[in-house]
Amino acid sequence: MNMHSPQHPTRFAVDCTLSYQLDAACDFIFMIHAATSHGQRLHSESLTLSPEATARTSVDAADHRVLRVHAPAGELHLRYLAEVEREPADDVTDTAEWPVQNLPDDTLAHLLPTRYCESDLLSGAAQKLFGGLPAGLSRVQYISDWIHQHVEYRLGSSTSTTTARDVFVQRAGVCRDFAHLGVTFCRALNIPARLVCGYVKFDDPPPDFHAVFEAFIGGRWHLFDPTRLAPLDRLVRIATGRDAKDVAFATIFGPARLLAMAPCIEPLVARHTQAAAMQPA
């Protein structure tokens, strides 16, 4: 978790490109649009499909902007550009875990086991590792630290069907696996937790969509990144869900192969900084 947020809103330029080879007509469901909630404000955006394809954007039940595309056989190239402003996080004043009876109704779904987060199956391990720790924000931070220390970040070590229990056994995975394990341990301790997918810039590995997790502590959601690949205050959120199946950047119906992807993001110079630079010495 990043306890030190920037003093001013930060702007980011998103430049996401995806390319596919389609052996026949295919349908896609994309989640690549920057969220317009959770302290984010959209200043501009554009979407280009080449060649032209049937496309429309809608908003789902979780307030995600979902892009549906139907494209004929051949190559499909997609480019999404956006300028997004992110507000700094509020100061943390309440670090207590809330008992289940006091949790808001909309957090209850994030206490339950899901396909990738088998909190029921890892309940014993979670209790043994973390059950004796003082409840609160520090316990979730300890969970995140434990995952960072005991799970190796290794590209190619997991697949689209790898679950939190698999990661706990094999002790290797990528960002979504780290996040799934964090979500699972929290839920096993009756702490609501969920997966967050977004854009972030990091040097290694190459540009990719990034997954972290959120835990509900002290009446609000707090972000954690067990991979420690990038500062959390530089993450531009795309989607939030129970696990990876809720936040996949692309769901494909048909024979399509990913040729290339580059979900890039760069911080922009804040306007207040520019204005200060223009003042006479």
Image (tube, grey):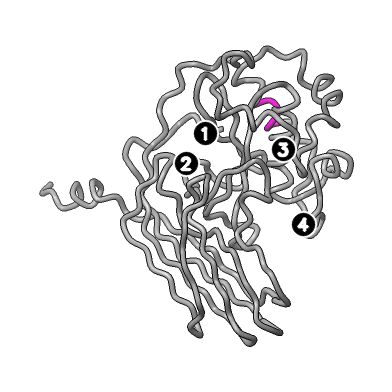
The residue pinned by badge 3 equals 148
Q: Indicate which disc residue 160 carries.
A: 4
Q: Could you tell me which secondary element the residue under label 3 belongs to?
A: helix
Marks 1 and 3 sit apart, C-alpha to C-alpha, by: 15 Å
Q: Verify CB contact (< 8 Å) between mark 4 and mark 3.
A: no
- Name the kind of residue labelled 2 in the image: Asp
- For discs 4 and 1, the disc positioned in front in the rendered view: 4
Q: Verify CB contact (< 8 Å) between mark 1 and mark 3.
A: no
Marks 1 and 2 sit apart, C-alpha to C-alpha, by: 7 Å
- Name the kind of residue labelled 3 in the image: His
Q: Position of residue 61 (x, y in %)?
A: 52, 46
Is residue 220 rendered magenta in the image? no
- Name the kind of residue labelled 1 in the image: Asn
User: How would you classify the magenta stretch by its main secondary structure?
Assistant: helix
If you read the primary sequence from the N terminus, does the residue marked by circle 3 or circle 2 appear first? Answer: 3
The local crowd at label 4, few if under 14, some if 14 to 19, many if 20 or more residues have their Cα within 10 Å, is few
Q: Is residue 184 left or right of residue 80?
A: right
If you read the primary sequence from the N terminus, does the residue marked by circle 4 or circle 3 appear first? Answer: 3
If you read the primary sequence from the N terminus, does the residue marked by circle 1 or circle 3 appear first? Answer: 1
Q: Verify CB contact (< 8 Å) between mark 1 and mark 2.
A: yes
Quarter of the view holding residue 188? top right
Picture residue at 62% right of the left edge, 63% below the top: 250
- For discs 2 and 4, the disc positioned in front in the rendered view: 4
Quarter of the view holding residue 120? top right
The residue pinned by badge 2 equals 233
Residue 122 drawn above or below residue 84 = above
- For discs 4 and 3, the disc positioned in front in the rendered view: 4
The residue pinned by badge 1 equals 2
The residue range painted magenta reads: 141-145
If you read the primary sequence from the N terminus, does the residue marked by circle 2 or circle 4 appear first? Answer: 4
Q: Verify CB contact (< 8 Å) between mark 4 and mark 1.
A: no
Q: Position of residue 60 (x, y in %)?
A: 51, 51
